[in-house]
Amino acid sequence: MQRNSGFTLIEVMVTMAIIAILAAIALPNYSNYVVRGKLQEAISNLAGMRTKMELYFQDNRTFVGACAAGTVAPLPSGLKYFNITCPAASLAATTYLVQADGLADLAGLTLTIDQANVRRTVSVPSGWGMPSTNCWVAKKTGEC
């Protein structure tokens, strides 16, 4: 008697269902992981700008004129996921505000830091949770 080898349709369907369930769980977790990685670009650049702004203040005793090319506190350029700015109205003798605005899939996300080292999430993209405290959002759920 000859025995047939191979898979039955039921076995293939069960395998496909298991793969679909695993993909449905893994894909959202992976995309959240990628977003958290992109946020590090803003966080590291804002923290770096804070240090540069303090150096500028030590040299000049004012924040006016900071964030310009040729100073010790130039704005970072060529970033992939964020645009770092110093709004002109925020620069004063003893105060400053450095802002990171998200680009592409992070559009609508705005993080700031000021002279008192207050780290604030100003706005988040739709579908994200807003943090309840003054902090930089670290996850789409609004956690810091």
Image: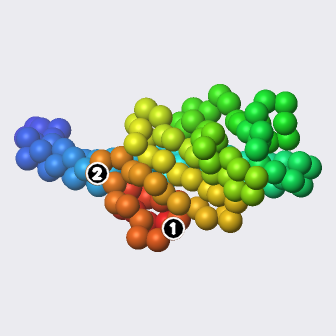
- Residue at the (12%, 38%) spot, across then down: 4
Closest to the observer, 4 or 10: 10
Q: Residues within 10 Å of mark 1 (few under 14, many from 20)?
A: few
The amino acid type, in three-letter code, at marker 1 is Asn
Element on which disc 2 rests: loop
* In the image, residue 79 above or below residue 40: above
Of the two numbered discs 1 and 2 on the same chain, state the one appearing first in sequence: 2
Task: Give the Cα separation between the discs numbered 1 and 2.
Answer: 19 Å
Callout in the foreground (1, 2): 1
Residue 99 horizontal side relative to residue 106, left or right:
right
Q: Residue 72, percent across and down?
A: 85, 41
**Left or right relative to 60: residue 83:** left
State the residue in front, 4 or 59. 59
Asked if residue 131 can be seen in this view, the reply is yes
Quadrant that contains the N terminus: top left
Q: Would residue 46 be visible to someone looking at this image? A: no
Residue under label 1: 134
**Residue situated in front as seen by the camera: 120 or 37:** 120
- The part of the image, by quadrant, that contains residue 114 is bottom right
Mark carried by residue 127: 2
